[in-house]
Amino acid sequence: MSWKPLRVLSPRSILPASAVMLVLAAGAAAHANKPVPFGDRVAGPGDAGATPVNSESLSSADLDLRVGPGLEAFHRQTGEQAWSYRREGAEALYLAMAGDNAIVVWDDGLVTSVRPGDHEVRWHRAVPGLADWLRGDGEPGADKRTDAQRKALAQQRAAAALHTVQRDGSPWLALVTPNLTMGLRDADGDLRYNDKPAAGCVFDPLRTVHTDYAVLVPRTCANGSGQPASGAITGYRLDNKGWAMSTGPAASFKVLDGSRVEITDGPIVPPKVFDTKAAAPETACGSLDAPFAAVRPQGGCADPSATPAGGDPAAQAPPAAPGAPVAADPAQDAATAPDAGAPAGDRPAAP
């Protein structure tokens, strides 16, 4: 094994102290000017430089959150601005809460999760095709839209694209565009699923709805000649593979409560209710499947055995109120009345 003695630096090889300081200063300046990932800037009130700030920890209930041009937080009690989160070259379009965290959709197709209490940016996710759909470039009439109309369209579509699901304290979110839907876990932004529509079909974000358990995404399809064909609706959850059902091309959806959605599929087919918690449709009362139904209608069904028989007038008569006169039986009165056949004037008077 060879061994070499330590090299002794000569005085000429040692940098002067002033040069060392210049190198360190240059490195610090380069680090300070390094672009922040995704252009993130968090600032306090009136801080035009948008440098990171430290503030007391607050809960989301203490703050009034707004979008435009970034995510702006104001104290509820005083109305004063607490902090502002912005991204260089991007504008915030829509905000939704996933538990205690704020989810923001930006016009460049990025989605961001922010914890309002300490204004920490938790994660970013880019959604392929979202920015193009928000802008609506190339669509019929797009070149005639005013700036105000373009912004209004982008805000409407951003709200349709983002759906937050408050599932048992573990919220997640879905991003829906015509050509892609994605499911993200809010805890860390992890991608849990992504799905594309079948050939000849597109998802319809503007008709998409969500409950506390699932997101229901309709899709519309066209045949070879471009005419509308039967569509479908797909339900997405993070704890199972979801489900799908066929619908007409213009079915509508109404959220009834935290788990149930009413599906109306034209004037001929009666509306039906789907329970997203049980992942099954409600079975209508009176149907042959009612005794074996996985999901019964809200409030249950009446028991036919408890209904009085239709041919029993006595059973149909409501019970008399206490103290109310009881209606007499005409047959009984005729049989028991004294001198029933005598003229009325010949009957004995009551005492």
Image (spheres, rainbow, N blue to C red):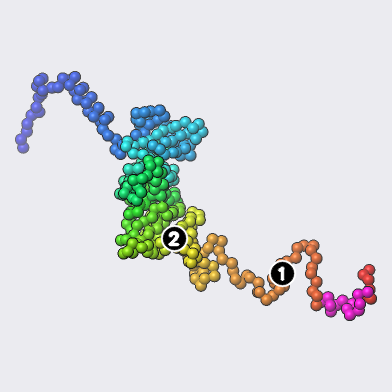
Does the rendering let one see residue 40? no
Cα separation, mark 1 vs mark 2, equals 45 Å
What is the x, y in percent for residue 276? Answer: 45, 58
Amino acid type of the residue tagged 2 in the rendering: Ala
**Secondary structure state at the residue bearing disc 2:** loop
On residue 317, the disc is: 1
Camera-side residue of 198 and 243: 198
Q: Is residue 36 left or right of residue 164?
A: left
Could you tell me which residue is drawn at 73 percent across and 66 percent down?
319
Does the rendering let one see residue 253? yes
Camera-side residue of 306 and 209: 209
Could you tell me which residue is drawn at 47 percent across and 60 percent down?
263
* Mark 2 crowd level (few <14, some 14–19, many ≥20, 10 Å Cα): many
Marked residue nearer the N-terminal end (1 or 2): 2
Assign the N terminus to one quadrant of the image: top left
Camera-side residue of 230 and 59: 230
The residue pinned by badge 2 equals 251
**Secondary structure state at the residue bearing disc 1:** loop
Q: Is residue 226 left or right of residue 273?
A: left
Could you tell me which residue is drawn at 71 percent across and 67 percent down?
318
Up-down relation of residue 70 to residue 259 (above or below): above
Q: Is residue 333 left or right of residue 343?
A: left
What is the x, y in percent for residue 312? Answer: 69, 75
Q: Is residue 308 left or right of residue 56?
A: right
Assign the C terminus to one quadrant of the image: bottom right
